[in-house]
Amino acid sequence: MGFPSSDTPDFHSTAASPLEPVYVSPVPPVPPRRQPPIWRHLILFLLTVATTMFVGAEHFASFHLDFGRGALDLTTPQFILNGLWYSASILAILGAHEFGHYYACRRYGVDASLPYFLPAPLPLTGTLGAFIRIRQTIPGKRELFDIGIAGPIAGFIVAIPVLLVGMSLSRLTELPTDTQGFVELGEPLLFKGVAWLFWGTPPEGYSINMHPMAFAAWFGLLATALNLFPIGQLDGGHISYAVLGRKSTLMTLGTVAALIGLTWVSSSWLVWTVLTVVMLVAFGPRHPRTVDEDIPLDRTRLWLAAAALLMFILCFTPAPLEPFDLVARP
């Protein structure tokens, strides 16, 4: 998930070449704060395991019963344990994302917390994701870029094998006549490509009955796309600022306008759009400055920025969730 950065300039020299100017920090370095008790992180993680296992058990029941046709004892230990298919997969993706940020912070000596997982008794997901707290200023653009992009790359790398395994465990299933209450998932390009690789084009009246691991991968790809939106304090906002400097403000405003437009395509964007607008009002459209904002990034990081754009394209879907409207077959 995104992480906040401070407005206070606190740049420490990381010059890689004598041709680059060397900056001296205008304030003394901030000493690392004492880590909060690890039990807070552990309790939140265990609660998230519980909520995602319960939701994952429901996903497995739907998968096992071929879209809910049949009966299953939901009180058996086996039913709950089958929730691990989804729970372990989504926590691995979200955990890799946040630990990507965390270890990038450690590399640059930036004081950051361990990941906080967010349990939530929500249908479909069972969690609101995870985040880390960065408790001091990120020194410069290169450090900001590396910390910002490390999370999406790490989460994306874990999501790919989860998607491949999950799709291989899925199966083609005939759709029931009554699909009232069903939800259709919008398929990102990567998800659609892997589904076609394993199952081709399903015949009329059939659909891929997704294994819980496949759904975890779908959610992980969506979370990656959401975080890569080039807006404010999101990962994509940090990457955009590191690449474009002050011009990234126009990117932020344009992306928010595009999000508002997406709510007309799919109402499932409404909550995310409201959250981003609230974030924009609370923090302002301009990214906090770094002292070296006028110094361009090196070519390697520019290629990584292009890779982040490609990840966004592969993970994005214009209509994440829609009611399933199927005409009843005779």
Image: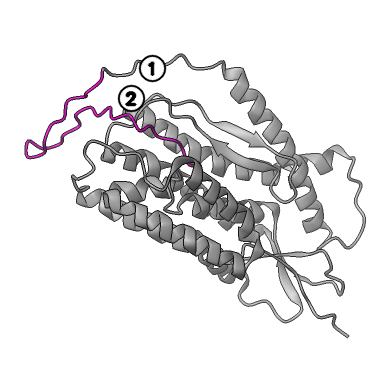
Is residue 19 found inside the magenta-colored segment of the image?
A: yes
Do tag 1 and tag 2 residues touch (Cβ < 8 Å)?
yes
The answer to whether 158 is drawn above or below residue 169 in the figure is: above
**Label 1 vs label 2: CA separation?**
8 Å
Residue 132's spot in the image, x, y percent? 50, 32
Q: Nearer the viewer, residue 1 or 268?
A: 268
Label 1 packing within 10 angstroms: few (<14), some (14-19), many (20+) = few
What amino acid type is highlighted by mark number 2?
Gly
The answer to whether 324 is drawn above or below residue 165 in the figure is: below
Image coloring type: one colour
Residue 326's spot in the image, x, y percent? 78, 76
Position of residue 13 in the picture relative to residue 89 (left or right): left
Provide the major secondary structure of the magenta segment.
loop
Element type where label 2 sits in the image: loop
Label located before the other in sequence (1 or 2) = 1
Residue 80's spot in the image, x, y percent? 80, 40
Label 2 packing within 10 angstroms: few (<14), some (14-19), many (20+) = some
Position of residue 262 in the picture relative to residue 208 (left or right): left
**Residues drawn in magenta:** 1-27
Residue plotted at (63% across, 77% down): 201
Residue plotted at (38% across, 30% down): 105
Considering the image in quadrants, where does the C terminus appear? Answer: bottom right
Position of residue 208 in the picture relative to residue 35 (left or right): right
Q: Which residue is mark 1?
A: 32
Q: Is residue 317 visible?
A: no
- The image quadrant that residue 313 belongs to is bottom left
What amino acid type is highlighted by mark number 1?
Pro
Q: Is residue 207 visible?
A: yes
Residue plotted at (33% across, 24% down): 109
Residue plotted at (47% across, 34% down): 99
Q: Nearer the viewer, residue 181 or 249?
A: 249
Q: Which residue is mark 2?
A: 109
